[in-house]
Amino acid sequence: MTKSASFDVIGTCFEFTAPIEAIQRRLGPKLSTAAVDPKTLFFSWFYAAQRDFTYVSLCGSYKPIAEVLKLTFRRACLVVDLPADAVSDEDIAEVMKAFKSMGPREGLKNCCDGLRDAGWDVYGVTNGGKEVSLNYYKNAGIELDSEHLLSCDDVKVAKPDIRVYENANRHLSAKGLGKAGDGERWFVAAHAWDITAARKAGFKTAYLDFEEHDPVTEVFGEFDLYAKSMDELLEKLKKVA
């Protein structure tokens, strides 16, 4: 039976250098008055936007994450004491444009190609928009078509809502790829909260530590596999019985 690996996309497969550098270019000199560096501002903004994206979804008022990010950037700047009038519409547009051009994690293409060569099917399951996410893969020279990319925009609920992972299970079943809980379906992410939800939906779970660095098992429990890189992930998944 064909195994499948469903990857989170933003932060797991594609990293944040481009938007962080855009913040540096557009706002770098102004950040000295806010006592915050571009990376810290980015992650305080991004993590807060993820929270708002999820909470609004839980309230039944789903908004695409790109919209949430765009509209909360000035608020994130205010939180770190950068005045709202120091951030222009053009600044926000450039940061959001950079968000659309994020590059792949090191080893991503080798991992995807290697899994396929080993008989696996590879999918993306993302909070991001479908078109933008497909362009990430295209720009990185990685084969992934629309049938292998599932977006929260399609079901109008945000991860980690269990319905996202149930939708992924239905899609995999329609493709003839085993059944939920049979051990043939894996979910891969660099976010412990993401694969905690996937585990509840019956996926085997693989945690990459290059974003959060610590899986905090006291909160999220144990996962089935841990890796520090895409290359290590590939080798460990290939050895899965």
Image: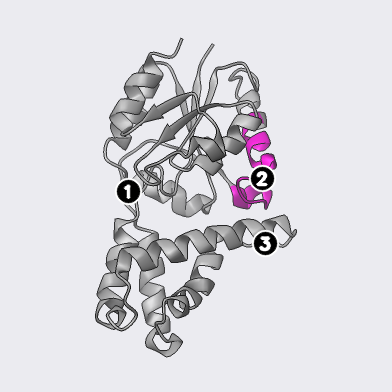
Question: Is 124 on the left or on the right of 82, as rendered?
Answer: right
- Quarter-of-image position of residue 239: top left
SS at mark 1 in the image = helix
Disc 3 to disc 2, C-alpha distance: 12 Å
Determine which residue is flagged by label 2: 161
- The residue furthest right is 60
Q: Which portion, as a residue range, is magenta?
A: 152-169
Q: Position of residue 188 (x, y in %)?
A: 47, 33
Count the numbered circles shown. 3
Determine which residue is flagged by label 1: 139
Three-letter amino acid code of the residue under disc 2? Asp
Q: Which residue is drawn at 31% across and 50% down?
A: 103
Quadrant holding the N terminus: top right
Disc 1 to disc 2, C-alpha distance: 29 Å
Residue 159 shown in magenta: yes
Q: Residues within 10 Å of mark 3 (few under 14, many from 20)?
A: some
Main secondary structure along the magenta-highlighted residues: helix
Residue 82 shown in magenta: no
Q: Position of residue 180 (x, y in %)?
A: 65, 23
Q: Residues within 10 Å of mark 2 (few under 14, many from 20)?
A: some
- The residue furthest front is 218
Q: Where is residue 8 in the image (x, y as percent from the top left)?
A: 48, 41
Q: In this view, does 188 lie above or below 158?
A: above
Three-letter amino acid code of the residue under disc 3? Val
Question: Is 174 on the left or on the right of 122, as rendered?
Answer: right
Q: Which mark is residue 56?
A: 3
Between discs 3 and 2, the one toward the N terminus: 3
Between discs 1 and 3, the one toward the N terminus: 3
SS at mark 2 in the image = loop
Between discs 1 and 2, the one toward the N terminus: 1
